[in-house]
Image (spheres, helix red, strand yellow):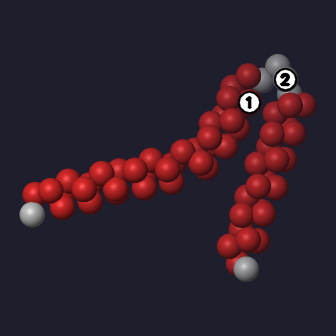
Amino acid sequence: MECVDTDSERNQALYLQDQHAQGNKDDLATRIWVETKKLWQFAGPAMFSLMAMLKRLGIAQTN
């Protein structure tokens, strides 16, 4: 259950950052930064798993 707490805390922090960014609509750089961090929460692990799978396939073909 420790992972759930960590994910919940991370989601809450991202939500608060998003709310803060929406409050400062004039600050485009802050909104872009918050959305980029949200995107990398999803895209980072997906890219890592894709690269690992492709590397494993490449190693399997050489043997």
Question: CB atoms at circles 1 and 2 under 8 Å apart?
Answer: yes
Amino acid type, mark 2: Lys
Task: Give the residue at the far right of this rendering.
Answer: 23
Residue at image position (51%, 54%) is 45
Is 1 on the left-hand or right-hand side of 39? Answer: right
- Point out which mark residue 8 bears: none
**Coordinates of residue 47 in the picture (x, y in percent):** 44, 47
Snapshot quadrant of residue 25? top right
The alpha-carbon separation of the residues under discs 1 and 2 comes to: 8 Å
Up-down: is 50 above or below 56? above
Dot 1 amino acid type:
Arg
> Which percent across, then down, holds residue 34?
70, 38
Determine which residue is flagged by label 2: 25
Q: Residue at x 68, y 73 (%)?
A: 3
As rendered, which of 28 and 1 lies closer to the eye?
A: 1
Residue at 76% x, 48% y is 14
Task: Please state which of residues 15 and 20 is positioned toward the viewer in this rendering.
Answer: 15
Residue ID for mark 1: 31
Upstream in the sequence, badge 1 or badge 2?
A: 2
Q: Is residue 29 above or below residue 2?
A: above
| Residue at x 76%, y 55% (from the top left corner) | 11
Q: Is residue 51 left or right of residue 56?
A: right
Image quadrant holding the C terminus, namely bottom left
The residue lying toward the viewer, choosing from 10 and 61, is 61
